[in-house]
Amino acid sequence: MLNTCIHLERDIATSIRLSSEIEQRLDLLAKQTGRTKAYYLRQLIEQGLEELEDYYLAADVLERVRKGQEQVHSAANVRKDLGLDD
C-alpha cells in the first residue's frame, strides 16, 4: 500500500494602502517591464521579509550576547581549533 501526502499551498489575498507616489512608481515599473504590480509587491515582501528576519534575529542574538546568555568564541580560538593557524 502506498501512502501519499499532498501539501497544497494556499495563496492568501491581502490589501495595503500605498501613497499615490508609490502607486505611480509601481505602475510605471510594471508597464515598462511587462510584469504585474502583484509580481513586484510579492518580490518586495519576500526580499524585505528575509532582510527583516536577518536583522531582527541577529539583533536577538546580539542582545543575548550582551546579557551573557550566548556563548562567544574569539576568532583566534576558532582558527586555532580548526587548525588554521599555521
Image (tube, rainbow, N blue to C red):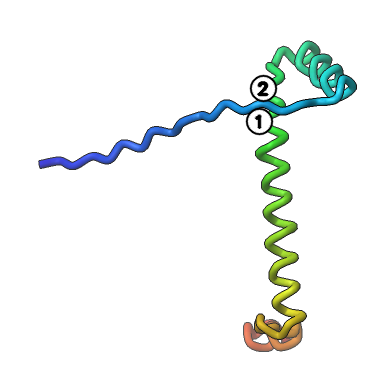
Q: CA distance from mark 2 to mark 1?
A: 6 Å
Q: Along the horizontal axis of the image, is 1 left or right of 84?
A: left
- The outermost residue toward the left is 1
- Label 2, residues with CA under 10 Å away: few <14, some 14-19, many ≥20: few
Which residue lies at the image location 70% right of the left edge and 56% below the top edge? Answer: 54
Residue on which the image places disc 2: 38
Where 64 sits versus 55, above or below?
below
Which of the 4 image quarters holds residue 39?
top right
Quadrant of the rendered structure where residue 15 is? top right
Q: Which mark is residue 80?
A: none
Q: Quadrant of the C terminus?
A: bottom right
Q: Would you call the spot at circle 1 few (<14 residues within 10 Å), some (14-19), or many (20 or more)?
A: few
Is residue 65 or residue 84 the one in the foreground?
65
Residue at x 73% of width, y 79% of height: 65
Q: Name the residue at the right extreme.
A: 21
Percent across and percent down for residue 30 are 76, 16
Residue plotted at (75% across, 72% down): 62
**Element at label 1:** helix
Vertically, is 31 above or below 5? above
Residues under numbered marks 2 and 1 in contact, where contact means CB atoms less than 8 Å apart: yes
At which x and y percent is residue 48? 73, 42
Find disc 1 in the rendering and name its residue: 42
Q: Residue at x 78, y 11 (%)?
A: 31
Q: Amino acid at mark 1?
A: Arg
- The number of numbered badges drawn on the structure is 2
In the image, residue 46 above or below residue 16: below
Going by the numbered disc 2, the residue's amino acid type is Ala
Q: What x and y, as percent, mark residue 28?
A: 83, 15
Horizontally, is 8 left or right of 4 in the view? right
